[in-house]
Image (cartoon, rainbow, N blue to C red):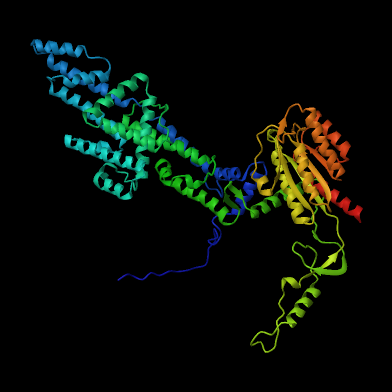
Amino acid sequence: MTPRQYWRYGQWAGGKDPLENPYDVRKALDEMADDVLSGNSAREALNRLLRRGADGRPGLDDLRRQARDRARDLRRQGKMDGTLLKVKELLEKAVEQERHALFPDPDDSARLAEAELDQLPSDPARAVQELQQYNWRSPEAAQTFQEIQDLLRKEVLDSQFKGMKDALENASQQDMEQIRQMMSDLNDMLDSDAKGEHTPEQFQEFMDKHGEYFPENPQNLEELVDQLARRAAAQARLMDSLTPQQRAELGDLMAQALGQAGLSDEMSRLQANLKSARPDLRWGGRERMQGEGSMGMSDATSALAELGELDELSGLFDQNYPGATLDDVDDEMVERALGSAAVDNLAQLREIERELQKQGYLQRTSEGLTLTPRALRRLGSTALRRVFADLASRGRGGHDVRNSGAAGETTGASRAWEFGDEQPLDVVRTVRNAVLRSASSPAAPGSSGKRRVQLSVDDFEIAETERRTSTAVALLVDMSYSMELRGTWGEAKTTALALHSLITTKYPQDAIQIIGFSDYARVLTPAALAGHSWDMVQGTNLQHALILARRFLDSHRNADPTILVITDGEPTAHIAKDGFATFAWPPTRETLAATLAEVERATRRGATINVFMLDDDPRLIYFMQEVARRNGGRLFEPKPGRLGEFVVSDYITSRGAKKRKSA
């Protein structure tokens, strides 16, 4: 009879809230925002967060450091010529034992045998081959020579099949035939898989028959191939890491050992199949191993296979490839290389990424990992807070508008509501419309004649107001590579996001479009801007940006047009007659003329062009002074860290001046 279980409950004694989210994702998002506003993309910002870790937990940098320390320890285990040195040692021992047996024998045959031993080649592989037919006089020498054969067979097979040494202990000819049959069945299964004919039943049948040779107990053919291919690739790197002489000697010894065991053909076939199945592995290249001792071929292969996994893990921990995600990291590989604690740390880092997605801050699209609209709103708010904090710290005052977006004074008239209207509702007329409509409809059954007044979309009316002056702002942001080189791209991104957030939240009757330009110009959504690093291209095509700005302003004919330009260089590119951008530095007359022509068109459109210059290059200043002369706009040279303050202040000041002028 199962004993009863009793549970006792008591008052919570403090500590971490058991009901809170496992991670403060808002804090994590704010940390990412710092990186995004510094100029990085969302993917780069998340990578930096995961590398640092969060809430005091180890990050990917800690895991990468552990992998680097483990790799350093492996490389200090010793050199990789242990098997070759052991063969030479046993060979010298066998010859010495044989000489000791021949010396007291007065027969001429003993002298001939001694002469044969004297003429053995220095190459251990050739010496072993010649001694295959030698008639040993010393039983001890014959036994020592047999140890060479057993050693080579064990080392070669164990370097391919981990744990084979135990299976080959005191192996008979029948045991070797079973190994040959296992390799043949394995190759047949790999051939079937290459043709697309492999089935799970075939793998299970193979494991039932030969599972004793695979102590790691793979669960499917993919796992089996992964284990074998990694060791085969490590063995190939081992051979490449030896000197040419050592490589030739060990290669000949391996060939002899496999040939005598009847495994040469199957081993060659297996190597080819594994390389074809996993071409992504590193099947060559030198590895630098250090240390006082020497490792046998099997141990060296295991060390190199582990080094290969550590290198692969370092790349996965870096997460610097398209579509990267921590789910790409194999937990079993991490546990083999770094232990179970590293697996727990990795799981915690995965949880951070999952929580950011679960709580609606990150999303995976065809373009990779991006910020959601919810995250972008928080990012824009953060950028705006930074700008206003700078304004307040310099005594410029706040700019919070409590009646933001409100319409002008009411005229006393009303009209039916239409989608997109921002004027206040006329509540009295709206309810009156609903009452009149309900009066003409029959009462509901069982309502005892009572009628409910239910509002419908058609009932709504809005109070017409005096029209307030609205502004259309085209914000042109230089995204050329020089912005990153000068360290101004992050500040430009912050400013653009802050101004966009200000206009969309505080002045919704205004309109803003962000236009990025380098060799070409393009319209940027806040998401695209936040996810963009910079353009590593040549060209500052202000002409194309002004063309797109005019198109935006033309779509807002009733708004006051304003163009704000953030740049650190003079125009060096323009759209030629063939429709493609042409670049030249120093700027050509054609580029300058094409750009100034767009300035003239924007001026005739009535747009004001205000330029914020992020460099004091005389050529830039001279050109922008010409822009100001033709347009009547203003030039600003904000000091580092004050771009956002200048741009936002200019927008608010200009908007207030236009409002007073219209009044």
Q: Which residue is drawn at 36% across and 71% down?
A: 4
Measured as percent of width and height from the top left, residue 143 is found at 16, 26
Q: Is residue 205 above or below residue 450?
A: above
Q: Which residue lies furthest to the left in this view?
A: 107
Q: How many labels does the image show?
A: 0
Q: In this view, does 572 lie to the left or right of 91?
A: right
Locate residue 577, reporting x and y percent.
75, 34
Above or below residue 346? Residue 409 is below
Which image quadrant is residue 164 in?
Answer: top left
Q: Where is residue 271 in the image (x, y as percent from the top left)?
A: 33, 33
183 up-or-down from 2: above or below? above
Whether residue 409 is visible: yes
Kindly identify the residue that appears in the image at 19 percent across and 24 percent down.
Answer: 145
Residue at point 78%, 27% (across, down): 588
Residue 358 on image: x %, y %: 56, 56
Q: In this view, does 86 lie to the left or right of 634?
A: left
The quarter of the picture where the C terminus appears is: bottom right
- Asked if residue 134 lies left or right of residue 264, the reply is left
Residue 620 visible to an observer of this rendering: no
Look at 77% across and 36% down and name the residue there: 614
Above-or-below relation of 460 to 161: below
Q: Which residue lies furthest to the bottom in this view?
A: 448
Where is the N terminus found, in terms of image quarters? bottom left
Relative to the observer, which residue lies in front, 318 or 92?
318
Horizontal side of 620 relative to 119 (left or right) equals right
